[in-house]
Amino acid sequence: MAGHSKFANIKHRKEKQDSKRGKVFTKLGREIAVAVKAGGSDLDSNSRLRDVVAKAKAANMSNDTIDRSIKKAAGELDSVNYEDVTYEGYGPSGIAVIVQALTDNRTRTVANVRFAFTKGGGNMGTSGSVAFQFDHVGQIAVEAADGVDEDELMMVALDAGARDFAAHDEGFEIITEPSDFSAVREAIEAAGFPILSAEITMLPQLTSKLEDPEDIKKMNKILDMLEEDDDVQDVYHNWEM
């Protein structure tokens, strides 16, 4: 079973998403646009788009808003020129941080990311400087709602190709290989289980604590600034919050 629970961080991210929903929806719209450009607007044939739509639904984006975003992206293919970029660095006391962004201007994005690290007492590193400390996986969190049978959920997930299953007080965590993520998510969804979040993510192999209140303040500064940046899609770190 999973070596350590990320459920607390999942809940923390969702609470922050709920409090900044407009900005979250803007970022999800950008992900939808990139997915549509990569594989078209047909959900049946575009697994990347299906995954983004599932992520949008978990963030409480309405079906109407999702449909409008897909149609808008399909009608503006020539204007969608975002590219995936990844930055790595360190926060206070060596906390490892990975930043994934979608940008139409690398110069602007790298400057903003570097500024966030600097303001929080950290620094950017070179490519690969911290990525080796993380595992690239699919992660699905299912709420421990009434009627959710742990054994049934586990069998559905494992039969669909999940590599790991863990039960926590707040719910259940399923880990997959990235290539199996869509199949497992869709099987869990089809079985009617309430998905709290579902995403391809980077999980730290080991976590680190911050004891100094000033370091905690600085680390939160980095995360807040990065999450406020429209270009930044996801931020991963090994801070045990």
Image: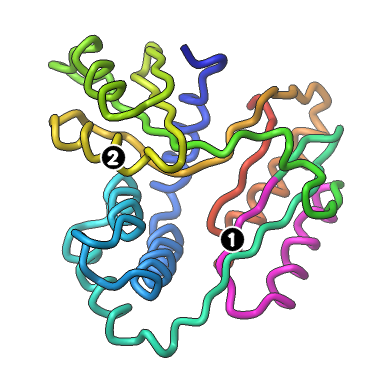
Badge 1 marks a residue whose secondary structure is strand
Q: Which mark is residue 211?
A: none
The residue that mark 1 highlights is 232
105 left or right of 90 in image: left
Instruction: Verify whether residue 119 appears in magenta.
Output: yes
Stretch of the chain drawn in magenta: 98-120
Residue at the image position 63 percent from the left and 50 percent from the top: 224
What amino acid is at disc 2? Ala
Instruction: Residue 74: give x, y in percent of width and height.
Output: 28, 80
Residues under labels 2 and 1: Cα distance? 27 Å
Instruction: Residue 6: give x, y in percent of width and height.
Output: 51, 25
Q: Determine whether 202 is above or below 108 in the image.
A: above
Q: Determine whether 45 is above or below 68 in the image.
A: above
What amino acid is at disc 1? Val
The residue that mark 2 highlights is 183
Callout 2 crowding tier (Cα within 10 Å): few <14, some 14–19, many ≥20: some
Instruction: Residue 33: give x, y in percent of width and height.
Output: 38, 72
Q: How is the image coloured?
A: rainbow
Foreground residue among 128 and 213: 128
Callout 1 crowding tier (Cα within 10 Å): few <14, some 14–19, many ≥20: many
Query: Does the magenta stretch mainly form a helix, a strand or a loop?
Result: helix
